Amino acid sequence: MPVSQLGPIVSVMVAVAVDKPYSYRVPEGMEVKRGSIVVVPLGPRPTLGVVWGVPEDNFAHNRLKDIAHVFDVPPLSEELLQLVDWVARYTLAQPGMVLRGALRSREGLDPPRPVIAYRRAGPEPERLTDARKRVLDTMDDAMPWAKAALVGASGVSPSVIEGLVRTGTLEQIELPPPPPVMPPEPDFAPAQLSEDQQRALDEIRAHDSGGFSVALLDGITGSGKTEVFFESVADCLREGRQVGVILPEIALTHTFLDRFERRFGQRAAEWHSDMTPMQRARVWRGVLTGEVRAVIGARSALFLPFRELGLFVLDEEHDGAFKQADRVNYHGRDMAVVRASLAKARVILSSATPSVESRNNANQGRYALVRLESRFAEASLPDITALDMREEGPEKGQWIAPRLARAVFDALDRGEQALLFLNRRGYAPLTLCRACGHQYQCPDCSTWLVEHRFRGVLMCHHCGHEERAPEVCGSCGAVDSLVAVGPGIERIAEEVADRFPGARPVVLSSDMGSMSQIRDRFAEIARGEYNLIIGTQLVAKGHHFEKLSLVGVIDADLGLAHGDPRAAEKTFQILTQVTGRAGRASKTGKAFLQTYHPEHPVMQTMVKGDREAFYAHELKVREQGGLPPFGRLAALIVSGTDHDETFAYAKRLMAAAPLSENVRRFGPADAPVAMVRGRHRVRILTQSPKDFDLSGYVRFWLDNADPPRGSLRVQVDIDPMSFY
């Protein structure tokens, strides 16, 4: 709406922790619209905000302040503004904090800086030194050259170029900056799809009505899901609309960018926390102006200012990393569906192990269910064996069962690769003193310190606290009395060095270096420089190693040991993903699961390869318990610096809960991890039927309860994925 329609006073949502927009005057001569990005005075400092519309209180008075500045960029789209309101309302987050996620790059609002370049403008100088001659020879193509490129190509110092400008031989000019990325070409290298892949693509296209739709691409590991949804990306680009491919791990981004470039001739823009502020600024502005047509990134890319959104693809849609658990507790998968519905765009959810919620939506007809049931290029699924550790466990002091060790030897002898998987970082999950029994615990969290022997430290995986691994017991002073309890991947690596002396091992986990270093390790594995991989869930998804024929899971029961209602689902997903790394090329793959519970439904599902039986069993259990997707959950986490005060407030909060026959309330109780970063944590859990407005119930509850004071805080998690 032009300024004449909005009037001289507008409401502005500022990108800070506020619950509603504030009113500001529009200075004479300034034009703003709904969605215009502005700077307004808020207290003592200028603050970024977005024009939200006509204020509820439209009375002019002297206390109103003027909008200080409006940026010369397109306004945010209507669907993005609606998304901010929707997310805030659903998650009980402050709208200003949600908006902050959409305004992630302040630098992207400023006009891009021109590129300083040089071109020939006159005759050669009277004094033509060797350095000057090299510069002129480099520029014999008569094209403008950027200064840095000219210095690099000619091997001279910048002063030589500046001297040629003074003589009139060269002139300095300004060129428009290059685009963040070149537009992808949808017809550059179309994939040669198998019959199964083409059928899946045809089903996705048939489901597309030109508006909002969701397709669940449910394909076994190695079935070629990426090739299928890349062709859907091409369809969207041909329509002139923008695409976002959202990944759960930024470690996967580089691989996807390479695959995208091979298919479309150009790299997509990338968006994740590893980027520099300048890179983020260029991509953010390019998405806003429409210059960037395709983005591959992490979950925060859902809030990029797309103007012509046509398609979201969420790869590994089941992954827990899509849940944001800081400030605004949203689930990336669910918010992608909401945003696509507002933008009348399409969504493809891709996974070899779809979430139970997505499978249920497909079963109910809300999503199109598109299956890929055969591996690409006739590769076969691995043969999976459960090793009963009660009967064929390893010798004392070892963690690799004998039958798995023999399979590793055989794979290495054949010149193939093997993967040993343990979803536990570090050397050991617990360090204690054998003399007095003292257990090393984080001083700020109620968790054990994990030994990282490679670095010589004890570390808390919740708050990041580190301390040097002691040489004597800090409790009794005994020397050489500390003992590691249980295995981490570093301990497995130590055993590998002893038992497989001819192997070329590599250890991979998220704390083993920077993202670029981890990408280098993956490239080296793909080239065959390592033949024995020891890793955490970092290696479980999105990687294709042609020589990998064997996977061994050291502690397959690990995820089942906690009181998490999603434990079976998460264990099934991680085991399916990691065992699916084996045999993805022409080699027949094998996988071994070391378990103390081979009769567990998850283990039986894995061995029999009957994934449909798992979903049927899990959906039945969820329905009986009224758990998602047949019911809804909301968690309230009360935290504070004093335990008794925190628990007392949680009890008062529980007593203030509105009575409703639709809501069951549990707690308060100390959280399983009862202290994090020096703050005690008490949990309250609520459960309701699926069609009940649980967000509205919790909002009414908190609005009418005594607010937390002092150090107390209440964090609301609608649809919790973690129960720690």
Image (cartoon, rainbow, N blue to C red):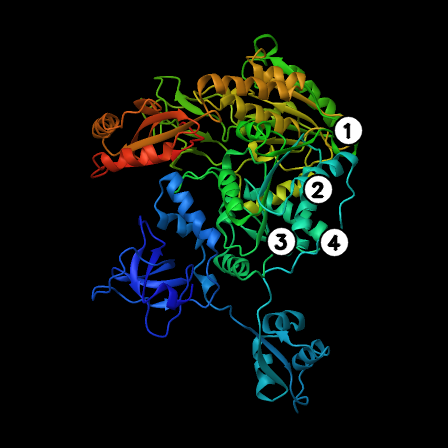
Q: Earlier in the sequence, mark 1 or mark 2?
A: 2
Residue that mark 3 sits on = 268
Residue 672 visible in image: no
- Closer to the chain start, of discs 3 and 4, is 4
Tags 1 and 2 touching, CB below 8 Å: no
Residue that mark 4 sits on = 187
The local crowd at label 2, few if under 14, some if 14 to 19, many if 20 or more residues have their Cα within 10 Å, is many
User: Which corner quadrant of the image does residue 595 belong to?
Assistant: top right
Counting from the top left corner in percent of width and height, residue 633 is at 40, 28
- The first of marks 3 and 2 along the sequence is 2
Q: Residues within 10 Å of mark 3 (few under 14, many from 20)?
A: many
- Residue at horizontal 37 percent and vertical 35 percent from the top: 695
Q: Residue furthest bottom?
A: 126
Amino acid beneath label 2: Glu
Q: Cα distance, mark 4 to mark 1?
A: 32 Å
User: Relative to 241, does residue 337 appear above or below in the rendering?
Assistant: above
Mark 1 to mark 2 CA distance (whole Å): 21 Å
Q: Quadrant of residue 9?
A: bottom left
* Mark 1 nearby-residue class (10 Å; few <14, some 14–19, many ≥20): some
Residue density around tag 4, few if under 14, some if 14–19, many if 20 or more, within 10 Å: some
Position in image of residue 50 (x %, y %): 39, 58
Q: Tell me the kind of residue under disc 3.
A: Ala
Residue, x 37% and y 31% (percent of image)?
Answer: 694
Q: Classify mark 4: helix, strand or loop.
A: loop
Q: Which residue is mark 2?
A: 227
Q: What amino acid is at disc 4?
A: Asp
The residue beneath circle 1 is: 587
User: Quadrant where the C terminus lies?
Assistant: top left
